[in-house]
Image (tube, helix red, strand yellow):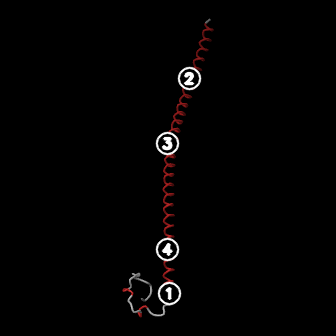
Amino acid sequence: MNCEYELFLSHCTSFLSHCTSFLSHSTSFLSHCTSFLSHCTSFLSHSTSFLSHSTSFLSHSTSFLSHCTSFLSHCTSFLSHCTSFLSHCTSFLSHCTSFLSLCDKLPVSLHQLPVSLHQLPVSLPYSLGCDC
């Protein structure tokens, strides 16, 4: 009977040892799970922060692109006005050239006219481009 008791005690001790080992492994596993969960939470936090910064960057980029488009539109409009102004200047120079050509074809010099240009009823431009 003493032998059976010792065998039972040995089995109990062995079972208790396995339970302790299982508990130790379970605790270690739980620790790793907690660590993994902590890393997951940290990753989620960084992902959310990255998403927030990406959204903000996208918003600023869109705003910047809008301002660039507006600036380009104003530049195009300004260039159009410059082209129109140059066209008018070219037309004016053409008229000046035609007028000077007519001045060269006059049979008499303007200084030989009996009336001064300042006495004419029509006001003429101050600078006609010829020796008047």
Q: Residue at x 60, y 17 (%)?
A: 15
Secondary structure of the residue carrying tag 3 is helix
- The quarter of the displayed image where residue 127 is located: bottom left
Q: Amino acid at mark 3?
A: Ser
How far apart in space, not on screen, are marks 2 and 1 (Cα)? 116 Å
**Mark 3, mark 2: which one is toward the viewer?**
3
Q: Give the residue number, with chain letter if any, for mark 3.
A: 49
Residue 23 tag number: 2
Residue 121 left/right relative to 44: left
Q: Amino acid at mark 1?
A: Leu
Q: Residue at x 61, y 7 (%)?
A: 2
Determine whether 5 is above or below 45 in the image: above
Q: Amino acid at mark 2?
A: Leu
**Mark 1, mark 4: which one is toward the viewer?**
1
Q: Give the residue number, with chain letter if any, for mark 4.
A: 88
How far apart in space, not on screen, are marks 2 and 4 (Cα)? 96 Å
How far apart in space, not on screen, are marks 3 and 4 (Cα)? 58 Å
Secondary structure of the residue carrying tag 2 is helix
Q: Residues within 10 Å of mark 1 (few under 14, many from 20)?
A: few
How far apart in space, not on screen, are marks 3 and 2 (Cα)? 38 Å
Q: Residues within 10 Å of mark 4 (few under 14, many from 20)?
A: few
Q: Residues within 10 Å of mark 3 (few under 14, many from 20)?
A: few
Secondary structure of the residue carrying tag 1 is helix
**Mark 3, mark 4: which one is toward the viewer?**
4
Give x and y (percent) for residue 132.
42, 88
Return the disc, 3 or 2, that comes first in the chain's sequence.
Answer: 2
- The quarter of the displayed image where residue 117 is located: bottom left
Give x and y (percent) for residue 93.
49, 79
In this rendered view, identify the residue nearer to me: 30 or 8.
Answer: 30
Q: Are marks 3 and 2 in contact (CB under 8 Å)?
A: no
**Mark 2, mark 4: which one is toward the viewer?**
4
